[in-house]
């Protein structure tokens, strides 16, 4: 609806994300920075693993609250790569991570928040005696 678009543009204008001048809307630097920070939500990677692949990589992460979107994006990909959650920030799944995925993690500055450990034997989700 026209009114919904008008309200959204007015809110973005008030917040300093865009500048509205008549029929023209310009994205301001604050708006560009916001878009750049949110682009992480749109880039996705395909899983190279089958569902039954061995779970031999332990992933632990501590991604700060200011990077909440990136943290949710990372968890989304762990699920997509058939990782299983042990605790909210501790997952186990197949290794290795795809190279392009690792490159992107480095690009969005998450690398220092994530630790991986190669397991000596495959983790069995149904056997608690590992």
Image: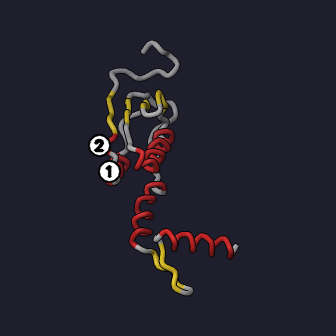
Q: Seen from this angle, which residue lies furthest right?
A: 1
Q: How many marks?
A: 2
Residue drawn at 43 percent across, 28 percent down: 55
Res 38 → quadrant: bottom left
In the rendered image of this protein, does residue 85 appear above or below residue 106? above
Instruction: Depth check: give the residue in front, 8 or 45.
Output: 8
Disc number placed over residue 109 in the picture, else none: 1
* Residue 113 position in % (x across, y down): 33, 41
Residue drawn at 35 percent across, 53 percent down: 108
User: For the N terminus, which image quadrant?
Assistant: bottom right
Task: Kindly indicate whether the residue at mark 2 contacts the one at mark 1 (C-beta within 8 angstroms).
Answer: yes
Q: CA distance from mark 1 to mark 2?
A: 7 Å
Residue drawn at 38 percent across, 48 percent down: 101
Disc number placed over residue 112 in the picture, else none: 2
Res 95 → quadrant: top left
Q: Seen from this angle, which residue lies furthest bottom?
A: 22
SS label for mark 1:
loop
* Residue 75 position in % (x across, y down): 47, 41
Q: Seen from this angle, which residue lies furthest left?
A: 112
* Residue 40 position in % (x across, y down): 43, 55
User: For the C terminus, which image quadrant?
Assistant: top left
Left or right, 118 with respect to 5, comes to left
Q: Seen from this angle, which residue lies furthest top?
A: 129
Instruction: Depth check: give the residue in front, 99 or 87.
Output: 87
Disc number placed over residue 58 in the picture, else none: none
SS label for mark 2:
helix
Q: Tell me the crowding category of disc 2: few under 14, some 14 to 19, or many 20 or more residues within 10 angstroms, Cα based.
A: few
* Residue 39 position in % (x across, y down): 44, 59
């Amino acid at each position: 609806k026209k009114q919904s678009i008008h309200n959204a543009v007015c809110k973005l204008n008030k917040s300093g994300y865009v500048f509205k001048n008549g029929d023209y809307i310009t994205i301001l630097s604050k708006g560009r920075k916001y878009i750049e920070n949110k682009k992480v939500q749109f880039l996705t990677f395909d899983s190279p693993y089958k569902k039954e692949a061995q779970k031999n990589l332990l992933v632990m992460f501590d991604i700060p609250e200011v990077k909440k979107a990136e943290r949710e994006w990372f968890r989304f990909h762990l699920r997509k790569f058939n990782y299983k959650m042990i605790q909210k920030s501790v997952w186990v799944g197949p290794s290795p991570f795809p190279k392009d995925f690792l490159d992107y993690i480095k690009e969005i500055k998450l690398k220092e928040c994530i630790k991986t450990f190669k397991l000596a034997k495959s983790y069995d989700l149904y056997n608690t005696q590992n």
